[in-house]
Image: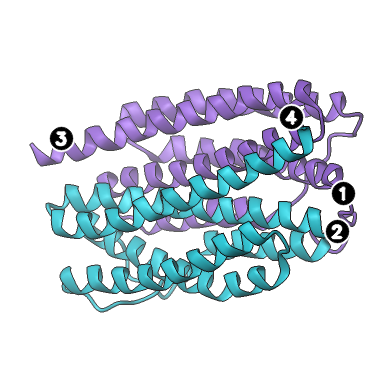
Chain colours: A cyan, B purple
Amino acid sequence: MGILSKPIKSLDDLFVHTLGDVYYAEQQITKALPKMIGKVTDPQLKQAFERHLDETRNQIKRAEQVFKMHGKEAKAVKCPAIDGIIDEAEEIMSDASDHEVLDAAALASAQAVEHYEITRYGTLVAWAQQLGRNDCAEVLRQTLEEEKATDLKLTAIAEARVNRVAV
Amino acid sequence: MGILSKPIKSLDDLFVHTLGDVYYAEQQITKALPKMIGKVTDPQLKQAFERHLDETRNQIKRAEQVFKMHGKEAKAVKCPAIDGIIDEAEEIMSDASDHEVLDAAALASAQAVEHYEITRYGTLVAWAQQLGRNDCAEVLRQTLEEEKATDLKLTAIAEARVNRVAV
């Protein structure tokens, strides 16, 4: 949000605002992921990030599609939450001096990003339904399911790392 | 993190750093929740926030217990992620001019906070196990389960709102 943004008078305004928020978030993620891909060493993690970068580019198109279906111009809304999550990821990765530690930090950061997206898309699906826009809800649900699947893949990688050390 | 923080050389450093992160996050949440309780009108939501405020105070004590078990001084680490999530919640709530819209925004913001905590505690449990500290993992898992239960309660309230409008 911020002082230049439109006042939020209705659920429709809130929906469009939050769609702009995830649209911004996805754009920031496409900038952050290549840096993370360049830094991590675990091949499974690198591959998961590469796959998610492709998905994210497609999710940006899907957000644009929902803006269009809803008769609004696609407009990113700068929001502090995703900026904070990404700043924290970059800080912690730059402070990690060992590649195993860096991979663990990158994995945790990616899961924080996924959870942010899961909560926002979950909210958007609910609000689209509440507004009677099941068509928009359906498109947003595709992204929500992709984000959940990515989180599950990252959790499986994290669990494999725990077991590898525990053996 | 930040320029004054300790360099992260090992998974143990990363664990202690992230424990400091959630310790800071819980403290910020105890400051933010009373403001949200004062603003929302939905009685179910107000009650859920009040219950979670009590839980959060207990989670702070649990984080202190884990620091102690791990032989470290309890120290909050200022991190941009929770600050960003809370700033965004406060901004969007101050821009909402209708009480129904404000409640919807508050609910969505609380779910974003919960998801942030779920991902961080999930990571901390995994790292505690990886470090062979199942005792710490057990205490952290109690908080993780509480956060998941709170998120489910908030989701149920969100779904009831969707159905109420859809009827």
For marks 4 and 2, give the one nearer the viewer. Answer: 2
The kind of residue on which mark 3 rests is Arg
Tell me if B53 is positioned left or right of B64 in this view: left
For image coordinates 77% across by 33% down, the residue present is: A166
Q: Is residue B79 above or below residue A26?
A: above
The kind of residue on which mark 4 rests is Ala
Q: Do labels 1 and 2 share a chain?
A: no
Distance in Å between CA atoms under marks 4 and 1: 20 Å
The kind of residue on which mark 2 rests is Asp
Query: In terms of image quadrants, where is residue A93?
Result: bottom right
Q: What element carries label 1?
A: loop
For marks 3 and 2, give the one nearer the viewer. Answer: 2
For marks 4 and 3, give the one nearer the viewer. Answer: 4
Which is more N-terminal, label 3 or label 1?
A: 1
Mark 4: give few (<14), some (14-19) or many (20+) Cα within 10 Å. Answer: many
Residue located beneath label 2 in the image: A98
Q: In which quarter of the image is the C terminus of chain A?
A: top right
Residue located beneath label 1 in the image: B10
For image coordinates 62% across by 58% down, the residue present is: A45
The answer to whether residue A1 is seen in the rendering is no
Q: Do the residues labelled 1 and 3 touch (CB within 8 Å)?
A: no
Q: Are marks 1 and 2 in contact (CB under 8 Å)?
A: yes
